Amino acid sequence: MKGLIREEKGRMALVDNLESPEPGEGDVLVRVHTASVNPYDRESADGVYDGYYDEFGVQEPVRTGLEFSGEVVSQGAVFGAGDRVYGYVHLITGWKTHAEFITVPESYLAPIPEGLKETEAAALPLGILTSLNVFEDMRPVTGAGRVLIIGAAGGIGVYAVQVAKALGYEITALCSPVQRDFVAELGADHLPDFDPETLDGLPGNYDIILDLSTRFRLDQCESLLSNVGKFVPALPDDANGGNSESVKVGYLMVMEGDGKRLEKAADWIASGDIKPVIDQVYSFSDHLSAFDRLNVRGKKGRIIMTWAK
């Protein structure tokens, strides 16, 4: 079996001598056809999460890749051989998706919506689940709220805009000037001029500020929040205030897949309220270019890798 492994910190290699995993109770074996590449994978390759892997006793050789699409190989209680599925794996434990085969709990999976290509399906799970985590689970007001999305054209931002729109939020989106028309087409209501260092120029009174750029701190955003508003940094830490006990902070974490939530989004996908947004598609054999693409500013949507058939 082929898969990406870390030869040393920061250095990934494609090997073809891995043993295919065996599904346990509640799992199915899935042949991965496509998978995304995101900043978490880069950090994992760099050793940022080695302590967590050690703590959880992770032994699997493939530790990059979170979302995917593919075909079920084994028979499960819900899915059977030949079913086209997509999903998101566990953030720490178990097999990651940069491999030809993975075992995954059936509860993490959903059928690929009708009409979607597998490359499109693999671009959706993390963005949908992350956005629902913010805009449903952290929703501080009933009815339509006001949201500020910083980094609205990126791999998660493009789905945050679409999901927020589908849920009825009034959306202010921040992105580079060249991406504003694109983000407006996704559903953003306001794309204002602002100071990119301080956020000066924004009207404020936002119920949620989602910072996907990882550039801002709670103390920079607090004055822009409504009385019940929450600041949600994509990578919470002590420096940005994301680990504080403040009621003004929402902690963003999607630890594992959720097939029911993905199925809920199927109606939005069918109606066109949520569209896959893909930046580039690479072969797994060209994984170095895919990982390098993560560092390029001005990306639009997800970076995808596919196994050549």
Image: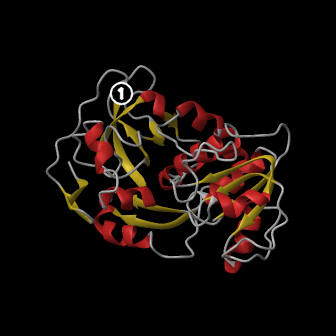
Left or right of 66 on screen, residue 124: right
**Element type where label 1 sits in the image:** strand
Quarter of the image for residue 89 reads top left
On the image, which quarter does residue 241 sit in? bottom right
Q: Nearer the viewer, residue 155 or 101?
A: 155
Residue drawn 17% across and 54% down? 16
Q: Is residue 129 above or below residue 258?
A: below
Above or below, 238 relative to 179: above
Q: Nearer the viewer, residue 57 or 204?
A: 204
Q: Quadrant of the C terminus?
A: bottom left
Looking at this rendering, what residue extends furthest in the left direction?
17
Look at 74% across and 40% down and name the residue there. 139
Say if residue 51 shows up in the picture.
yes
Q: Amino acid at mark 1?
A: Asp
Residue 288 occupies quadrant: bottom left
Q: Position of residue 164 (x, y in %)?
A: 73, 49
Q: Position of residue 104 (x, y in %)?
A: 37, 34
Q: Residue at x 53, y 33 (%)?
A: 259
Residue 83: percent from left, percent from top: 44, 34
Instruction: Report which residue position mark 1 lands on.
Output: 27
Q: Is residue 85 above or below residue 187?
A: above
Residue found at the far bottom of this picture: 178
Which percent across, then down, holds residue 94? 32, 37
**Residue at image x 34%, y 38%?**
93
